[in-house]
Image (cartoon, rainbow, N blue to C red):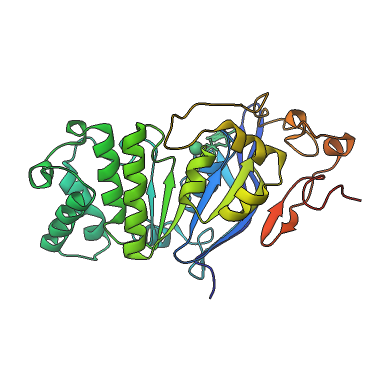
Amino acid sequence: MAPLLSVKNLHTYFYRPDGVVKAVDGISYDLEVGETLGIVGESGSGKSVSVLSMLRLIRKNGRIEEGEAVFDGQDLLTLDKEELRTIRGKEISMIFQDPMTSLNPTFRIGRQMMEPPLWHNLLGSQEARQKALHLLERVGIPEHKSRFFDYPFQFSGGMRQRAMIAMALICEPRLIIADEPTTALDVTVRSQILNLLQEMKEALGMSIIMITHDFSMASNFCDQIIVMYAGKIMEKASTMEFLSNCLHPYSQGLIRSTLDLDTMDVKLNPIPGSPPNPIYPPSGCRFHPRCERRQPICAEEIPALREGGADHWVSCHFAGGGVKK
Ligand SMILES: Nc1ncnc2c1ncn2[C@@H]1O[C@H](COP(=O)(O)OP(=O)(O)O)[C@@H](O)[C@H]1O
Ligand SMILES: [Mg+2]
Protein backbone atom coordinates (compact mmCIF):
# COMPACT_ATOMS: atom_id res chain seq x y z
CA MET A 1 0.00 0.00 0.00
CA ALA A 2 1.23 3.50 -0.81
CA PRO A 3 2.22 5.61 2.18
CA LEU A 4 -0.30 8.19 3.37
CA LEU A 5 2.35 10.87 3.09
CA SER A 6 5.57 10.84 1.16
CA VAL A 7 7.91 13.80 1.58
CA LYS A 8 10.74 13.94 -0.93
CA ASN A 9 13.73 16.22 -0.93
CA LEU A 10 11.90 19.13 0.73
CA HIS A 11 13.82 22.42 0.85
CA THR A 12 12.42 25.56 2.51
CA TYR A 13 14.54 28.69 2.72
CA PHE A 14 13.87 32.04 4.38
CA TYR A 15 15.19 35.24 2.89
CA ARG A 16 16.38 37.68 5.54
CA PRO A 17 18.19 40.97 5.00
CA ASP A 18 21.32 39.40 6.48
CA GLY A 19 21.23 36.21 4.43
CA VAL A 20 19.39 33.01 3.56
CA VAL A 21 18.27 30.58 6.25
CA LYS A 22 18.17 27.05 4.87
CA ALA A 23 15.60 26.04 7.48
CA VAL A 24 14.75 22.74 5.80
CA ASP A 25 17.48 21.48 3.53
CA GLY A 26 16.50 18.32 1.70
CA ILE A 27 14.46 16.03 3.90
CA SER A 28 12.59 12.90 2.81
CA TYR A 29 10.40 10.45 4.67
CA ASP A 30 7.29 8.28 4.32
CA LEU A 31 4.43 7.99 6.77
CA GLU A 32 2.15 4.96 6.60
CA VAL A 33 -1.55 4.85 7.42
CA GLY A 34 -2.00 4.48 11.19
CA GLU A 35 1.65 5.21 11.93
CA THR A 36 3.04 7.74 14.40
CA LEU A 37 6.20 9.54 13.33
CA GLY A 38 8.26 11.60 15.75
CA ILE A 39 10.36 14.50 14.48
CA VAL A 40 12.94 15.27 17.16
CA GLY A 41 15.66 17.88 17.49
CA GLU A 42 16.73 20.96 19.39
CA SER A 43 15.02 24.28 18.92
CA GLY A 44 15.72 25.80 15.49
CA SER A 45 16.44 22.52 13.72
CA GLY A 46 13.62 23.01 11.19
CA LYS A 47 10.96 20.74 12.68
CA SER A 48 8.09 23.24 12.56
CA VAL A 49 9.05 24.68 9.20
CA SER A 50 9.16 21.16 7.73
CA VAL A 51 5.49 20.57 8.51
CA LEU A 52 4.28 24.14 8.02
CA SER A 53 5.78 23.98 4.51
CA MET A 54 3.50 21.08 3.62
CA LEU A 55 0.45 23.05 4.62
CA ARG A 56 1.96 26.16 3.04
CA LEU A 57 1.69 28.08 6.28
CA ILE A 58 5.17 29.56 6.25
CA ARG A 59 5.72 33.29 6.43
CA LYS A 60 6.02 35.44 3.34
CA ASN A 61 9.80 35.62 3.43
CA GLY A 62 9.96 31.82 3.15
CA ARG A 63 9.99 29.83 -0.06
CA ILE A 64 9.69 26.15 -0.80
CA GLU A 65 12.61 25.76 -3.16
CA GLU A 66 12.25 22.15 -4.10
CA GLY A 67 10.57 18.91 -3.17
CA GLU A 68 7.31 17.04 -2.97
CA ALA A 69 4.86 16.23 -0.21
CA VAL A 70 2.50 13.64 -1.67
CA PHE A 71 -0.51 13.10 0.56
CA ASP A 72 -2.95 10.43 -0.56
CA GLY A 73 -1.72 10.72 -4.14
CA GLN A 74 -1.70 14.54 -4.36
CA ASP A 75 1.36 16.74 -4.08
CA LEU A 76 0.40 19.31 -1.45
CA LEU A 77 3.12 21.63 -2.71
CA THR A 78 1.52 22.04 -6.12
CA LEU A 79 -2.11 22.43 -5.05
CA ASP A 80 -3.58 25.89 -5.27
CA LYS A 81 -4.67 27.65 -2.07
CA GLU A 82 -8.32 26.70 -2.53
CA GLU A 83 -7.58 23.00 -3.03
CA LEU A 84 -5.29 23.05 -0.05
CA ARG A 85 -7.96 24.63 2.10
CA THR A 86 -10.24 21.68 1.40
CA ILE A 87 -7.57 19.35 2.78
CA ARG A 88 -6.43 21.47 5.73
CA GLY A 89 -8.61 20.90 8.77
CA LYS A 90 -10.51 18.10 7.07
CA GLU A 91 -7.91 15.55 6.00
CA ILE A 92 -4.96 17.03 7.87
CA SER A 93 -5.29 18.88 11.19
CA MET A 94 -2.65 20.65 13.14
CA ILE A 95 -2.25 21.01 16.90
CA PHE A 96 0.11 23.78 17.98
CA GLN A 97 2.18 24.22 21.11
CA ASP A 98 0.24 27.35 22.01
CA PRO A 99 -3.50 26.72 21.76
CA MET A 100 -4.04 30.44 21.37
CA THR A 101 -2.49 30.15 17.89
CA SER A 102 -5.53 28.14 16.82
CA LEU A 103 -8.26 29.25 19.18
CA ASN A 104 -9.89 32.55 18.43
CA PRO A 105 -10.21 34.45 21.72
CA THR A 106 -13.40 36.21 20.62
CA PHE A 107 -15.49 33.10 19.88
CA ARG A 108 -17.00 30.66 22.32
CA ILE A 109 -15.25 27.26 22.35
CA GLY A 110 -18.26 25.30 21.12
CA ARG A 111 -18.93 27.66 18.27
CA GLN A 112 -15.35 27.49 17.02
CA MET A 113 -15.37 23.71 17.20
CA MET A 114 -18.43 23.59 14.97
CA GLU A 115 -16.80 25.80 12.38
CA PRO A 116 -14.56 23.30 10.48
CA PRO A 117 -17.25 20.65 9.79
CA LEU A 118 -19.68 23.39 8.78
CA TRP A 119 -17.10 25.06 6.54
CA HIS A 120 -16.23 21.76 4.88
CA ASN A 121 -19.93 20.89 4.50
CA LEU A 122 -19.42 17.67 6.40
CA LEU A 123 -22.16 18.12 8.97
CA GLY A 124 -25.28 20.16 9.51
CA SER A 125 -25.44 22.61 12.36
CA GLN A 126 -27.26 20.28 14.76
CA GLU A 127 -24.90 17.39 14.05
CA ALA A 128 -21.85 19.64 14.38
CA ARG A 129 -23.08 20.80 17.78
CA GLN A 130 -23.67 17.21 18.91
CA LYS A 131 -20.24 16.15 17.71
CA ALA A 132 -18.52 19.11 19.35
CA LEU A 133 -20.23 18.33 22.64
CA HIS A 134 -19.36 14.67 22.35
CA LEU A 135 -15.71 15.44 21.65
CA LEU A 136 -15.44 17.93 24.51
CA GLU A 137 -16.69 15.21 26.79
CA ARG A 138 -14.41 12.66 25.18
CA VAL A 139 -11.30 14.78 25.74
CA GLY A 140 -12.26 15.18 29.39
CA ILE A 141 -13.61 18.71 29.71
CA PRO A 142 -15.60 18.68 32.96
CA GLU A 143 -19.14 19.98 32.70
CA HIS A 144 -18.72 20.03 28.96
CA LYS A 145 -22.32 21.08 28.30
CA SER A 146 -21.94 24.40 30.04
CA ARG A 147 -18.25 24.77 29.14
CA PHE A 148 -19.30 24.59 25.49
CA PHE A 149 -20.32 28.23 25.89
CA ASP A 150 -17.06 29.40 27.50
CA TYR A 151 -14.51 31.63 25.81
CA PRO A 152 -10.94 30.30 25.52
CA PHE A 153 -9.69 32.57 28.33
CA GLN A 154 -12.09 30.82 30.72
CA PHE A 155 -10.28 27.51 30.14
CA SER A 156 -7.04 26.51 31.89
CA GLY A 157 -3.97 25.81 29.71
CA GLY A 158 -4.55 22.04 29.88
CA MET A 159 -8.22 22.45 29.00
CA ARG A 160 -7.39 24.69 26.06
CA GLN A 161 -5.00 22.03 24.77
CA ARG A 162 -7.75 19.42 25.12
CA ALA A 163 -10.23 21.67 23.34
CA MET A 164 -7.74 22.17 20.55
CA ILE A 165 -7.30 18.41 20.20
CA ALA A 166 -11.09 18.03 20.11
CA MET A 167 -11.22 20.70 17.44
CA ALA A 168 -8.47 19.00 15.43
CA LEU A 169 -10.43 15.74 15.57
CA ILE A 170 -13.87 16.99 14.72
CA CYS A 171 -13.54 16.33 10.97
CA GLU A 172 -11.91 12.94 11.67
CA PRO A 173 -8.74 13.77 9.74
CA ARG A 174 -6.46 11.10 8.35
CA LEU A 175 -3.38 12.89 9.61
CA ILE A 176 -2.82 14.92 12.75
CA ILE A 177 0.30 17.02 13.00
CA ALA A 178 1.08 17.94 16.60
CA ASP A 179 3.81 20.55 17.01
CA GLU A 180 5.15 20.32 20.57
CA PRO A 181 1.60 19.96 21.87
CA THR A 182 2.58 19.30 25.46
CA THR A 183 5.65 21.48 25.98
CA ALA A 184 3.75 24.13 27.93
CA LEU A 185 1.95 21.65 30.17
CA ASP A 186 2.90 20.08 33.47
CA VAL A 187 3.92 16.43 33.59
CA THR A 188 0.55 15.00 34.65
CA VAL A 189 -1.49 16.90 32.08
CA ARG A 190 1.15 16.06 29.50
CA SER A 191 0.72 12.32 29.88
CA GLN A 192 -3.06 12.68 29.90
CA ILE A 193 -2.91 14.55 26.60
CA LEU A 194 -0.61 11.94 25.07
CA ASN A 195 -2.86 9.12 26.22
CA LEU A 196 -5.82 10.93 24.75
CA LEU A 197 -4.10 11.37 21.39
CA GLN A 198 -3.14 7.70 21.39
CA GLU A 199 -6.71 6.60 22.12
CA MET A 200 -8.14 8.84 19.45
CA LYS A 201 -5.57 7.67 16.96
CA GLU A 202 -6.54 4.05 17.58
CA ALA A 203 -10.26 4.81 17.50
CA LEU A 204 -10.06 6.73 14.23
CA GLY A 205 -7.14 4.91 12.55
CA MET A 206 -5.25 8.18 12.06
CA SER A 207 -1.60 8.79 11.37
CA ILE A 208 0.25 11.28 13.55
CA ILE A 209 3.36 13.41 13.13
CA MET A 210 4.56 14.38 16.59
CA ILE A 211 7.12 17.16 16.78
CA THR A 212 9.09 17.35 19.98
CA HIS A 213 12.51 18.25 21.36
CA ASP A 214 12.04 15.47 23.91
CA PHE A 215 13.51 12.21 22.70
CA SER A 216 12.05 10.14 25.54
CA MET A 217 8.58 11.42 24.78
CA ALA A 218 9.01 10.50 21.12
CA SER A 219 10.26 7.05 21.99
CA ASN A 220 7.26 6.42 24.24
CA PHE A 221 4.78 7.64 21.70
CA CYS A 222 6.07 7.05 18.18
CA ASP A 223 6.59 4.08 15.87
CA GLN A 224 9.27 5.81 13.82
CA ILE A 225 11.63 8.66 14.68
CA ILE A 226 13.46 11.23 12.60
CA VAL A 227 16.21 13.26 14.21
CA MET A 228 16.75 16.66 12.61
CA TYR A 229 19.67 19.04 13.04
CA ALA A 230 20.12 22.39 11.28
CA GLY A 231 17.59 21.58 8.56
CA LYS A 232 18.82 18.07 7.79
CA ILE A 233 17.88 14.55 8.80
CA MET A 234 20.66 13.03 10.89
CA GLU A 235 19.03 9.69 11.56
CA LYS A 236 15.80 7.91 10.78
CA ALA A 237 14.63 4.54 12.10
CA SER A 238 11.90 2.70 13.95
CA THR A 239 11.74 3.52 17.65
CA MET A 240 12.81 -0.04 18.53
CA GLU A 241 15.81 0.29 16.26
CA PHE A 242 16.67 3.70 17.75
CA LEU A 243 16.56 2.40 21.28
CA SER A 244 18.62 -0.70 20.57
CA ASN A 245 21.02 0.61 17.96
CA CYS A 246 21.18 4.41 17.89
CA LEU A 247 24.02 5.37 15.55
CA HIS A 248 24.41 9.13 15.18
CA PRO A 249 26.47 10.96 17.82
CA TYR A 250 23.83 13.72 17.83
CA SER A 251 20.96 11.28 18.44
CA GLN A 252 23.02 9.60 21.13
CA GLY A 253 23.53 13.00 22.73
CA LEU A 254 19.80 13.71 22.61
CA ILE A 255 19.05 10.40 24.29
CA ARG A 256 21.59 11.11 27.02
CA SER A 257 20.26 14.61 27.59
CA THR A 258 16.66 13.82 28.50
CA LEU A 259 15.15 12.02 31.40
CA ASP A 260 12.12 9.82 31.50
CA LEU A 261 8.75 11.35 30.71
CA ASP A 262 7.40 10.07 34.02
CA THR A 263 10.08 11.85 35.99
CA MET A 264 11.11 15.43 35.64
CA ASP A 265 12.18 16.96 32.38
CA VAL A 266 15.65 17.73 33.59
CA LYS A 267 18.64 17.93 31.29
CA LEU A 268 20.97 15.28 32.62
CA ASN A 269 23.82 15.60 30.28
CA PRO A 270 23.28 18.27 27.66
CA ILE A 271 25.14 18.18 24.36
CA PRO A 272 27.97 20.73 24.64
CA GLY A 273 27.73 23.84 22.48
CA SER A 274 24.67 25.15 20.74
CA PRO A 275 23.01 24.83 17.33
CA PRO A 276 24.79 26.73 14.55
CA ASN A 277 23.97 30.14 13.11
CA PRO A 278 21.36 29.16 10.52
CA ILE A 279 22.69 31.58 7.91
CA TYR A 280 26.26 30.31 8.13
CA PRO A 281 26.00 26.63 9.04
CA PRO A 282 29.27 24.71 9.41
CA SER A 283 30.75 23.10 6.32
CA GLY A 284 30.56 19.33 5.91
CA CYS A 285 28.49 17.70 8.59
CA ARG A 286 26.57 20.51 10.29
CA PHE A 287 26.97 18.83 13.65
CA HIS A 288 30.75 18.42 13.42
CA PRO A 289 31.79 21.37 15.67
CA ARG A 290 29.88 19.79 18.54
CA CYS A 291 30.72 16.17 17.78
CA GLU A 292 33.11 14.28 20.03
CA ARG A 293 33.90 11.85 17.21
CA ARG A 294 34.74 14.39 14.52
CA GLN A 295 37.61 13.82 12.11
CA PRO A 296 38.96 16.12 9.38
CA ILE A 297 36.57 14.68 6.77
CA CYS A 298 33.58 15.81 8.84
CA ALA A 299 34.38 19.48 8.12
CA GLU A 300 34.95 18.78 4.44
CA GLU A 301 32.20 16.51 3.18
CA ILE A 302 28.49 16.44 3.84
CA PRO A 303 27.76 12.85 4.84
CA ALA A 304 25.05 11.16 2.77
CA LEU A 305 22.07 9.58 4.48
CA ARG A 306 22.94 5.93 4.20
CA GLU A 307 21.64 2.63 5.46
CA GLY A 308 22.89 1.67 8.92
CA GLY A 309 20.56 -1.27 9.60
CA ALA A 310 17.09 -2.54 8.76
CA ASP A 311 15.19 0.50 7.49
CA HIS A 312 17.64 2.56 9.52
CA TRP A 313 19.26 5.60 7.93
CA VAL A 314 22.07 7.71 9.26
CA SER A 315 24.01 10.71 8.05
CA CYS A 316 27.45 10.40 9.59
CA HIS A 317 30.84 9.52 8.14
CA PHE A 318 31.63 7.28 11.07
CA ALA A 319 28.36 5.72 12.18
CA GLY A 320 26.71 2.60 10.83
CA GLY A 321 29.27 0.27 9.35
CA GLY A 322 32.35 2.12 10.60
CA VAL A 323 34.58 4.53 8.78
CA LYS A 324 33.59 5.43 5.26
CA LYS A 325 36.16 4.80 2.52
N1 LIG B 1 10.01 33.72 9.00
C1 LIG B 1 11.28 33.34 9.22
N2 LIG B 1 12.30 34.11 8.78
C2 LIG B 1 13.58 33.75 8.95
N3 LIG B 1 13.96 32.61 9.54
C3 LIG B 1 12.99 31.80 10.00
C4 LIG B 1 11.60 32.11 9.87
N4 LIG B 1 10.87 31.11 10.43
C5 LIG B 1 11.77 30.20 10.88
N5 LIG B 1 13.03 30.61 10.64
C6 LIG B 1 14.28 29.90 10.96
O1 LIG B 1 14.19 28.58 10.47
C7 LIG B 1 14.90 27.70 11.32
C8 LIG B 1 13.99 26.54 11.68
O2 LIG B 1 12.93 27.00 12.48
P1 LIG B 1 11.83 26.03 13.11
O3 LIG B 1 11.36 25.07 12.09
O4 LIG B 1 10.81 26.90 13.75
O5 LIG B 1 12.65 25.24 14.23
P2 LIG B 1 12.12 24.17 15.30
O6 LIG B 1 10.65 24.00 15.09
O7 LIG B 1 12.92 22.93 15.05
O8 LIG B 1 12.45 24.77 16.63
C9 LIG B 1 15.35 28.52 12.51
O9 LIG B 1 16.69 28.86 12.31
C10 LIG B 1 14.46 29.72 12.45
O10 LIG B 1 15.10 30.84 13.01
MG1 LIG C 1 9.09 24.47 16.37
Picture coordinates of residue 311 (x, y %)? 66, 61
| 316 or 302: nearer the viewer | 316
Task: Choose top left, top right, bottom left or bottom right for residue 200.
Answer: bottom left
Please, which residue is most extreme toward the bottom here? 1
Question: Along the horizontal axis of the image, is 275 left or right of 190?
Answer: right
Number of marks drawn:
0
| 196 or 152: nearer the viewer | 196
| 12 or 15: nearer the viewer | 12
Task: Choose top left, top right, bottom left or bottom right for residue 264.
Answer: top left
Question: Residue visible at 13% across and 60% down?
Answer: 125
Asked whether the viewer can see residue 43, the reply is no
Picture coordinates of residue 13 (x, y %)? 62, 42
Question: Residue visible at 31% across and 37% down?
Answer: 189
Task: Choose top left, top right, bottom left or bottom right for residue 148.
Answer: top left
Question: Along the horizontal axis of the image, is 263 left or right of 280?
Answer: left
Question: Residue visible at 51% across and 65% down?
Answer: 32
Picture coordinates of residue 30 (x, y %)? 57, 61
Q: Height in image: 174 above or below 260?
A: below
Q: Height in image: 224 above or below 293?
A: below
Asked whether the viewer can see residue 170, the reply is yes
Picture coordinates of residue 52 (x, y %)? 49, 47
Please, which residue is most extreme toward the left here? 146
Please, which residue is most extreme toward the top here? 273
